[in-house]
Amino acid sequence: MKLGPFKNIVILTGAGISAESGINTFRDSNGLWEQHRMEDVATPEAFKRDPQLVWRFYSMRRLQAAHAHPNRAHEALVKFARTPGHEVHLITQNVDDLHHRADPTDHLPPLCMHGSLNQSRCVNCGTIYFDDHAYFNLKGDYAPQGTILCTPSQKASMDYLHQYKLDYRDFLPLSPCCKAAIRPHIVWFGEIPFHMTKINNLLTDADLFVSIGTSGQVYPAAGFLQIAKMSGATTVCINKEAIPQSQWIDHFIQGHASVEVPKFFESLT
Ligand code: OAD
């Protein structure tokens, strides 16, 4: 398939792009929502009811992400962004930080619309801290220092939570700013994703929109194919299985992200 040339390329990624790095998706068999009820761990109400349970869930995800590495699909996107002649923007629903780690020179900084596993925020004033600790891991204590979820410069910055001498309540740290609870800096069900104004502008300006490894079940991201298509973009979907938005997809490429993503982006250069 030879498409293009394109000038404004917008890419959306979901959990499928990180599956081959060993990170659980949400809705595949053995996915996170088969093992946990999202109402218990991914809503503001759940955090009010049982913050320890919510932190245990995100702590396990931090530990899993800290041991994962970017795969050929993450790397292919960065390689493509480095080639001249087009603008490339990346929107991700993933919180695992693998796009950042595949891109140490920051050629393709992702808009993390669902937040980031390596950040926490004060529930009182909203201050965001880098935080890669696991609370309530399986050993009942903290994660070993030196996880790779926060980079050395994030750990050295004044925004790193554990630079401070922290007070704790119920084994959970209180924010240095307000001495209030801290929560994962993750968008939960019922909350509005981050960067939506910028994302809408990118979608309406795109001449190519590529959706990778997302099931098309969660809005607003599930509506991006339609917005891009109705704004005049060519739309491509790379996924292991069909998704509900087929009427808005010009080219569907079925397969594994680590194989199909490098192949597709090489075909554009
Ligand atoms: P899902 O788990 O819903 O979907 C992952 C998609 O990736 C599925 O359609 C799989 O078929 C596909 N897939 C799996 N492995 C793949 C591979 N190796 N190559 C290509 N495709 C593969 O994950 P998301 O769509 O990202 O939100 O989920 C969207 C949001 O729902 C998440 O960001 C999360 C969740 O609830 C929040 O937590 C707010």
Image (cartoon, helix red, strand yellow):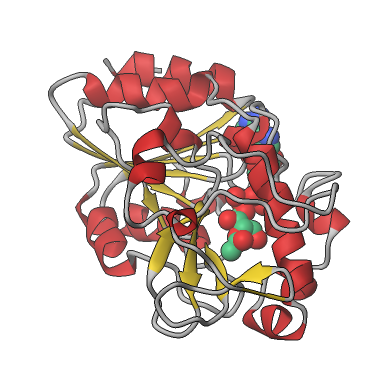
Q: Quadrant of the N terminus?
A: top left
Residue drawn at (79%, 58%), measured in percent from left and top? 33
Asked if residue 113 shows in the view, the reply is yes
Asked if residue 241 shows in the view, the reply is no
Relative placement, left or right, of 22 versus 100 is: right
Relative placement, left or right, of 95 versus 159 is: right
**Residue 256 versus residue 125: which sits nearer the camera?**
125
Q: Which quarter of the picture shows residue 11?
A: top left
From the top left corner, tell me how far across and down residue 153 is, in percent. Answer: 34, 38
- Total labels: the figure holds 0
**Residue 117 versus residue 111: which sits nearer the camera?**
117
Does 66 sit above or below residue 218?
above
From the top left corner, tell me how far across and down residue 170 is, in percent. Answer: 74, 76
From the top left corner, tell me how far across and down residue 112 is, in percent. Answer: 42, 53
Does 158 sit above or below residue 102?
below
Q: Quadrant of the C terminus?
A: top left
Does 251 sit above or below residue 187?
above
Does 185 sit above or below residue 216?
below
**Residue 45 versus residue 178: which sits nearer the camera?**
178
Residue drawn at (86%, 44%), measured in percent from left and top? 30
User: Residue placed farthest to the front in the image?
Assistant: 165
**Residue 97 versus residue 206: which sits nearer the camera?**
97
Residue drawn at (42%, 26%), measured in percent from left and top? 102
From the top left corner, tell me how far across and down residue 3 is, in percent. Answer: 31, 24
